[in-house]
């Protein structure tokens, strides 16, 4: 029986933390950006209406007074944008906390040479994992490009009418916004599915890679029993 076939035991927290410190563990960043984009798309209609009316009011005020825009005039334009950015960042932190764990520890900020070791970096570049990641990334981009091509039809029709008759209807701009948002939602949905599949594949390969053999588990347990800190905690209880 080979060593890979003998790795049937789940990784211990110590082994999992060591893999995380070496930068081997997948993170939820691949899932965070679709979530952030969804927040922006949800807020986009309200943001567009709010900032558009505020921009028109600011321009009229500047034209009437002949002075540059003050912070009071520009605040209705800036504030909605800041709110959307804060909401998107909040969703980013929430997704990373859910999928990466909430164990924010200062020792993870410490410098570790193995993360920038040239030898380790070259081994990763020429590894099978890197080749699989490159192929999966290419497939994901191909799926996104295909979805963008297939979903663009209704938007092209509305955009063609708008360019052919730019002054036909005052509400034509709002009619163009709805197909554009729907188009972005379609692409985002496909991107979310691709991101979820990519994260699951990374997680599956990572869990298989850090599984332990019975001998590795016994060796780690012996090391924990001989650790002075563990003995002190056990005796203290």
Image (cartoon, grey):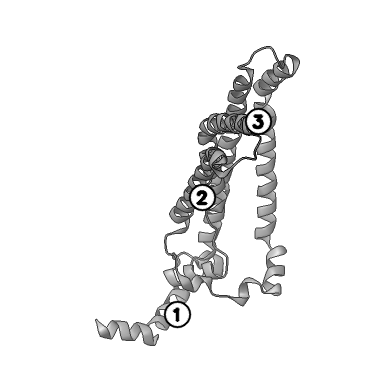
Distance between mark 1 and mark 3 Cα atoms: 78 Å
Q: Earlier in the sequence, mark 3 or mark 2?
A: 3
Identify the residue shown where x is 68% and y is 42%: 141
Q: What residue would you read off at disc 2?
A: 89
Identify the residue shown where x is 71% and y is 73%: 118
Distance between mark 1 and mark 2 Cα atoms: 43 Å
Q: What residue would you read off at disc 3?
A: 63
Nearer to me, 201 or 158? 158
Q: What residue would you read off at disc 1?
A: 219
- Which quadrant would the N terminus be assigned to in this image? bottom right
Q: Is residue 200 above or below residue 150?
A: below
Q: Which mark is nearer the camera, 1 or 2? A: 2
Residue closest to the far top: 168
Left or right: 160 in relation to 30: right
Q: Secondary structure at mark 3?
A: helix
Q: Earlier in the sequence, mark 1 or mark 2?
A: 2
Identify the residue shown where x is 58% and y is 75%: 111
Distance between mark 3 and mark 2 Cα atoms: 36 Å
Residue 1, visible in the rendered structure: no
Left or right: 76 in relation to 151: left
For disc 2, the neighbor class at 10 Å (few under 14, some 14 to 19, many from 20) is some
Q: What is the number of the mark on residue 116?
A: none
Q: Secondary structure at mark 1?
A: helix
């Amino acid at each position: 029986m080979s060593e890979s076939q003998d790795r049937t035991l789940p990784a211990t927290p110590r082994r999992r933390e060591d893999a995380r410190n070496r930068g081997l563990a997948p993170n939820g960043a691949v899932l965070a950006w679709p979530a952030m984009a969804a927040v922006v798309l949800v807020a986009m209609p309200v943001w567009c209406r709010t900032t558009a009316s505020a921009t028109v009011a600011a321009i009229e005020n500047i034209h009437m007074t002949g002075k540059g825009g003050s912070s009071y005039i520009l605040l209705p334009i800036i504030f909605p944008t800041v709110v959307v950015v804060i909401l998107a960042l909040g969703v980013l932190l929430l997704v990373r906390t859910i999928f990466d764990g909430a164990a924010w520890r200062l020792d993870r900020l410490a410098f570790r040479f193995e993360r920038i070791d040239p030898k380790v970096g070259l081994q990763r570049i020429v590894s099978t994992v890197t080749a699989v990641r490159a192929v999966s990334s290419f497939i994901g981009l191909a799926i996104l490009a295909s979805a963008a091509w297939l979903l663009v039809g209704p938007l092209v029709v509305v955009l063609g009418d708008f360019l052919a008759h730019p002054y036909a209807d005052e509400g034509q701009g709002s009619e163009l916004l709805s197909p554009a948002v729907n188009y972005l939602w379609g692409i985002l949905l496909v991107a979310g599915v691709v991101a979820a599949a990519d994260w699951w594949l990374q997680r599956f390969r990572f869990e298989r890679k850090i599984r332990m053999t019975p001998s590795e588990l016994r060796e780690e347990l012996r090391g924990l029993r001989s650790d002075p800190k563990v003995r002190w905690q056990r005796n203290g209880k």
